[in-house]
Amino acid sequence: MSEPFKKRRGICGICPAGCWIVATYDHGGKIVKVEADLNSPLGITCRLGDHSPEIIYASSRLLHPLRRKGPKGAYDFEPISWDQAYDEIAGRLNAIKAGFGAHAAAIYTGRGGFELAMCDIFQPKGVAISSASSLLFPFGSPNTMGVGALCYVAYAMIAPHVTMGAMLINMFPDIENAEMVVVWGANPATDSPALDLNKIVQARKRGAKAICVKEYTISYVFFPVFCVMPKPEYVKYAN
Ligand code: SF4
């Protein structure tokens, strides 16, 4: 009888959420399955995480830097080494600085994450978490911009601040002991990561009530709730 495939606990690296997972490896060391780590506080993965082996081993996945050699839009690229790529980027940034000043450079960053394990693993030692603090400010430019992370700003900053007077990072929802859960303007099943979904499902199973307040219809297949949909004119006013 052949040996069973090995399993390892880890974090999913597909997006910055860093959900806890269990990866199954075949005898050649290739990941064949990724599942939620049910012993972790989160205990859930999204569909992207479930299919992460397909992403990791996709033949079209970029593994090395490519330099455009044809006109824009012609998709004509050639592979270059990491050292070459860094040298070219640094050379061009310094040329911009020499010609127009450091302020001519800016950084635009995308979504953030609630889990810092990715930073712990990949970030060079001694740099700040923010790419602006590590690179742009020492370069001499203050011009940092970002997506304003619609989900994070709404869910972790504005909503808790105007309703509870505090930022989400300073709040600790006691869903485990709640008799009623109010889901306000969110769909916990589509959160990335789905931080509260399992807790709400468990709360519903032990008899807690759940009410959602949402301005459009969503399917709460995971945990049936009483849904309140404010009238459009009220939503307009509330916005
Ligand atoms: S949200 Fe999905 S893709 Fe992102 S880390 Fe979690 S399982 Fe992976």
Image: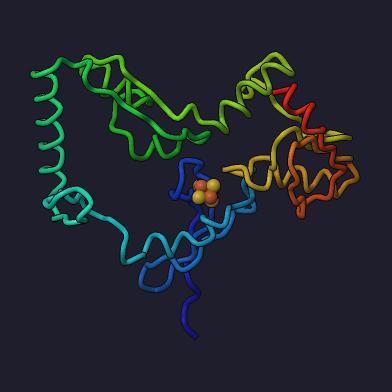
Q: Position of residue 33 (x, y in %)?
A: 50, 66
Judge from the rendering whether residue 185 lies leftward or rightward of residue 127; answer left or right.
Answer: right
Q: Nearer the viewer, residue 70 or 83?
A: 70
Q: Residue at x 20, y 55 (%)?
A: 74
Residue 213, quarter of picture: top right
Residue found farthest to the bottom = 1
State whether residue 143 is above or below residue 13: above
Percent coordinates x, y for residue 70 in the rendering:
12, 52
Q: Which residue is pictured at 23% across the width and 51% down the height?
A: 73
x and y, in percent, of residue 77 in the image: 16, 55
For the point 74% across and 22% down, the residue is: 238
How far across and how far down the image is residue 227, in percent? 84, 41
In front of the other: 167 or 148: 148
Against 171, is 9 above or below? below
Is the image coloured rainbow, by chain, by secondary structure, or in one colour? rainbow
Which of these two is toward me, 40 or 189?
189
How many discs mark residues in the rendered view? 0
- Rendering quarter of residue 214: top right
Looking at the image, residue 188 lies above or below residue 127:
below
Q: Is residue 76 left or right of residue 131?
A: left
Image quadrant occupied by the C terminus: top right
Q: Name the residue: 77% across, 43% down.
A: 200
- Residue 52 lies left or right of residue 208; in this view the side is left
